Image: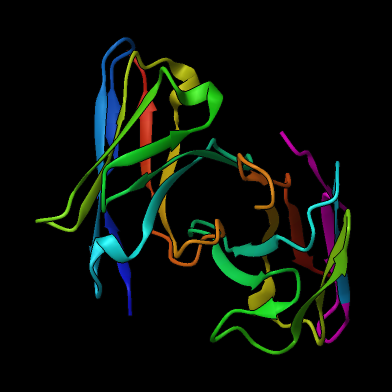
Amino acid sequence: DIRMTQSPASLSASLGETVNIECLASEDIYSDLAWYQQKPGKSPQLLIYNANSLQNGVPSRFSGSGSGTQYSLKINSLQSEDVATYFCQQYNNYPPTFGSGTKLEIK
Amino acid sequence: EVQLQQSGAELVRPGTSVKLSCKVSGDTITAYYMHFVKQRPGQGLEWIGRIDPEDDSTKYAEKFKNKATLTADTSSNTAYLKLSSLTSEDTATYFCTTDSGYWYFDFWGPGTMVTVSS
């Protein structure tokens, strides 16, 4: 199975700041990567697919980039409603696997 | 818009089985592959398996092959996850989610919390 290593495990940032979350795959996943946001007590919601495609309805302050084994999620102009845990997921290889998550808090 | 409605929380005894449901509204279940994902308290996400309601074909993660059984009923637009021989390791929230053919998950249910305790 492909291992997905996310960093950092937790992150504290101020409102209006820009934050980056990284995801490293154990082998090339050819941009078959999705990002999810999970707010406390809620189910995950798809933010990004194909490494950089924004899901319908997701604010444009979210963006994804990367290739090969290295990917990142960028959140511009951090808002209070962005407090959540963020997960990456690869779907290039079976079975699909998730990163361990990055918990984002407001400073 | 597609919505997934999951069955309520379960408190079950070790060694028993439980069957969870996930009803699709807003579209036909056969438009999607249906997946279930496990999340232990405070932990990450773990893929369990997938069913194609069109032909009932299934795929499972290796560690769930003797634990989970996925079924679907197209007449009620509902997918099911049965978990057997329950232990404390099965205490978790179980989410159902859809895949339109690309193996990323676009719609999610609210989750069903399963607590295994004597």
- Is A3 included in the stretch rendered in magenta? yes
Residue B23 lies left or right of residue A102; in this view the side is left
Residue A93 lies left or right of residue A42; in this view the side is right
Q: Residue at x 63, y 72 (%)?
A: A47
Relative vertical location of residue A20 with respect to residue A7 in this rendering, above or below: below
Q: Residue at x 36, y 33 (%)?
A: B114
The colour scheme used to paint the residues is rainbow
The image shows residue B97 at horizontal and vertical percentages of 42, 56
Quadrant of image for the C terminus of chain B: top left
Quadrant of image for the N terminus of chain B: bottom left
Taking the view exactly as shown, the residue that stands out farthest to the top is B15
Nearest the viewer among A97 and B9 is: A97
The image shows residue A2 at horizontal and vertical percentages of 75, 39
Relative vertical location of residue B39 with respect to residue B23 in this rendering, above or below: above
Q: Which residues are magenta?
A: A1-18
Q: Residue at x 28, y 23 (%)?
A: B12
Nearest the viewer among A17 and B99 is: B99
Q: How many marks?
A: 0
Residue A76 lies left or right of residue B92; in this view the side is right
The image shows residue B23 at horizontal and vertical percentages of 23, 57
Taking the view exactly as shown, the residue that stands out farthest to the front is B55
Taking the view exactly as shown, the residue that stands out farthest to the left is B75
Q: Quadrant of residue B3?
A: bottom left
Residue B80 lies left or right of residue B62; in this view the side is left
Q: Residue at x 62, y 41 (%)?
A: A94
The image shows residue B79 at horizontal and vertical percentages of 26, 48
Nearest the viewer among A65 and A104 is: A65
- Is A15 included in the stretch rendered in magenta? yes
